[in-house]
Structures are given as C-alpha cells and as structure tokens.
Amino acid sequence: MKVSINLLGIALFVAMLFSCDSTGNEGDSSNAEAVDNAVSENEATEETGFSKFEQYATILTKADLIAQFGAENVVDATETYAEGTAEKKMSVLTNPTNGQVIRYIWADDNTTTAWIEALYTLFDENYEQIGTQKIETESGLWTGMNLLELRDWNGEDFTFSGFGWDYAGGITPSKNSAIYNSPIGMTLDILSMEGAEFTLGDIELNTTDSRLENLDIVIAEFTLSIEK
C-alpha cells in the first residue's frame, strides 16, 4: 500500500499547480474556478460517468485524459515518492463538471496511467487551505471519512503509523479484512494536533486506543493502481 505525502508536501504540490498549467499559461482562471468548486461537497454527477473514484481509472493514457476532459482542465507536474528518491511525471485533472481533482501518475513512458490519486485537503499558492473535497468510492469509502467510520467499514480494528513523518498514516490491516481486500489504497492524516502529540513520529497506533476517538483523523488520500 503506498504511503501518503504529508500535508506540507500536499501544500507545496498544489501551490506548484497554481503557478503553471498544461499550456504554459500562468494563473489559468478556469483551473482556479474548478478547484474552488471542489471546496464544497461534491454531488455525484452520474450523467458524466465520472463521479466515483474508480471511474477515473478507466482513463488509461494521457491522450484519453485530454480527449475526455480537455487540455484546459489538465495540469502537468512532477512529484517525488519514496522519501524523495523517485520522481514521476503526473497530470492533475480538475473535472469541469463537478470540480473533483484527480491526480494521474504516469508510467515510465510518461503517457500510460500507472495509478491515480485523490487528496482530501486542497491548498492555494500561499499554502493556505482553501477547502476539502469529498470523493466517494463504489465500495462506500470517501475522502474525509473519519477514523471511527473507517473502522466500522473495515469491520475490525487496525494498526496505522504515526503522523509528522514521511510514512505518516500508512495503514497495516489484518489479512482478509475489508481494507486488506480493497483495491483502493488509503492513507490517514490528522487535521488538528491539539491534544494529539502522542500520535507523532515513527510509531504504531491502533484503533483500539480510546485516546484516538476524539481526534480529527481522516482518510487523506486514495490511490488505485491500473492493472496492465
């Protein structure tokens, strides 16, 4: 299961998106408006065929992505993974119909979809949070789902890593649990550190810990690999 980037990494990435677009124009208002739309809870737009996270995985190439949504709604960028040791080309789609923001990470040929991602928290070019997006899956998950809701969905308790480091919020589910069997990878984040100092660092946490019940821990990222 791929680990999430931390909130600072998300902020830096989204700030980069606002500084450039796929045509080389700075400050494209169409992208800004679309991201602004994502601040509100997204209503499913079934007629488009793109509202649930898995549906975006039907886009298998960059050419298909542009043909489906238009180049003006796609921003190219570069992201680093594995503690900065791996660099991948990516494109970020802002769905013009419902404002959903989906990241397409390309394979080594830079044109074939390797996996897709959806983040919960969005930031502006000044690293200020501008809102959140609720993106649902066909299995009943959503970005922003809190820890207790996820535990109930999973059907049992699970372990996850502490926050504030490169592998923050990585989940280690037990074999044959709902999370284990889900094709969608997910990572957690904590939205407020008040009273949560004990969750920081390279440690293991478990949903059996009653101290976690009042903390604002949510699903911060979805990932879905594309089968070849």
Image (cartoon, rainbow, N blue to C red):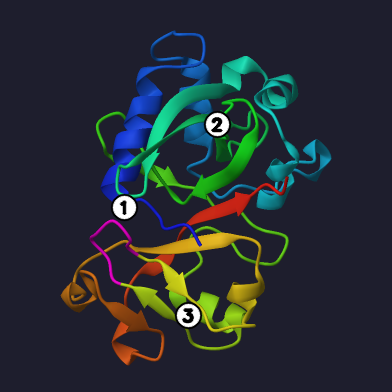
- Confirm whether the magenta stretch covers residue 197: no
**Label 1 – label 3 distance at C-alpha:** 21 Å
Does residue 53 appear in this view? yes
Q: Which residues are magenta?
A: 162-168
Residue 131 pos. (x, y %): 41, 45
Q: CB under 8 Å between callouts 1 and 2?
A: no
Residue annotated with mark 1: 6
Three-letter amino acid code at the position of disc 2: Asp
Q: Which residue is found at the position 31% from the left and 79% from the top?
A: 204
Secondary structure at numbered mark 1: loop
Q: Does 163 appear above or below 198?
A: above
User: Which label's residue is closer to the chain start, 3 or 2?
Assistant: 2
Considering the whole magenta stretch, tell me its main secondary structure: loop
Residue 9 pos. (x, y %): 30, 44
**Label 3 – label 2 distance at C-alpha:** 38 Å
Q: Give residue 50's mark.
A: none
Q: Nearer the viewer, mark 3 or mark 2?
A: 2
Three-letter amino acid code at the position of disc 3: Leu
**Label 1 – label 2 distance at C-alpha:** 24 Å
